[in-house]
Amino acid sequence: MATFGSADIMLGATDDISRIQLFDGPLEIGWHHCAMTADFVGELFAIRVGEASPDYREIRHSIGYLVNELIENAVKFRAPGIIAVEAAMRDGTFRVKVSNQVDRDTAARFQGLILEITDGDPGDLLIRRIEANAADPTYSGSGLGLLTLMSDYGARLAWVFNPSADGSRVFIETHAILPVVAPVAH
């Protein structure tokens, strides 16, 4: 098992966790479900601050963007299997874990990307990656979405890679924490 990032952002056993599972199917169905699932999670957790709150729309958007980016990555790079989304709100923060399986080569490439995007200032690296993508439109796997989450949304990320028993696949957990306002008391 390999862990990248800080364990303090991971969901805990005492968190009140909401869970959603996306079952394997054609990629088109998976893409359709990314935005729909992210919108649902954004609404589910933003409603806790109250629709009358001036921050409601921003919180809904930020949570939805975060969840959509993580689910899209899971769909894009997955090996056949379930994608699980688990989320909770704690201490004024939204926490999410997206789990899926990938093949060994994809896991190795992703670990290399993680080392690149977590080394240095995310804002500076985001600009360099945008420039690189503009120079070469065929370039993919640049981590722009993850860098945007870290730079523009203040998200903190962590990953756990756990090889399957036979070594053919790797189970990946992508954890994220996003600061939001505290829920209103009723």
Image (tube, rainbow, N blue to C red):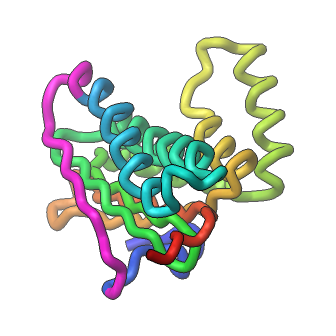
Residue 23, x across and y down, in percent? 14, 42
Residue drawn at (52%, 54%) of the image: 111
The answer to whether residue 20 shows anywhere in this view is: yes
Q: Position of residue 110 (x, y in %)?
A: 49, 47
Q: Position of residue 83 (x, y in %)?
A: 24, 48
Q: In the rendered view, would you say 20 is above or below 125?
A: below
Q: Nearer the viewer, residue 184 or 5?
A: 184
Residue 105's x, y, as percent? 38, 44
Tell me where residue 142 sits by quadrant: top right
Q: Which residues are magenta?
A: 14-29
Relative depth, front residue between 111 and 95: 95
Can residue 113 be seen at all in this image of the molecule? no
Residue shown at 32% from the left, 66% from the top = 162
Q: In the rendered view, does 20 fall on the left or right side of 154?
A: left
Q: Name the side, left or right, on which 124 lies relative to 163.
A: right
Q: For the C terminus, give its image quadrant.
A: bottom left
Nearest to the observer: residue 41 or residue 7: 41
Closer-to-camera residue (179/22): 179
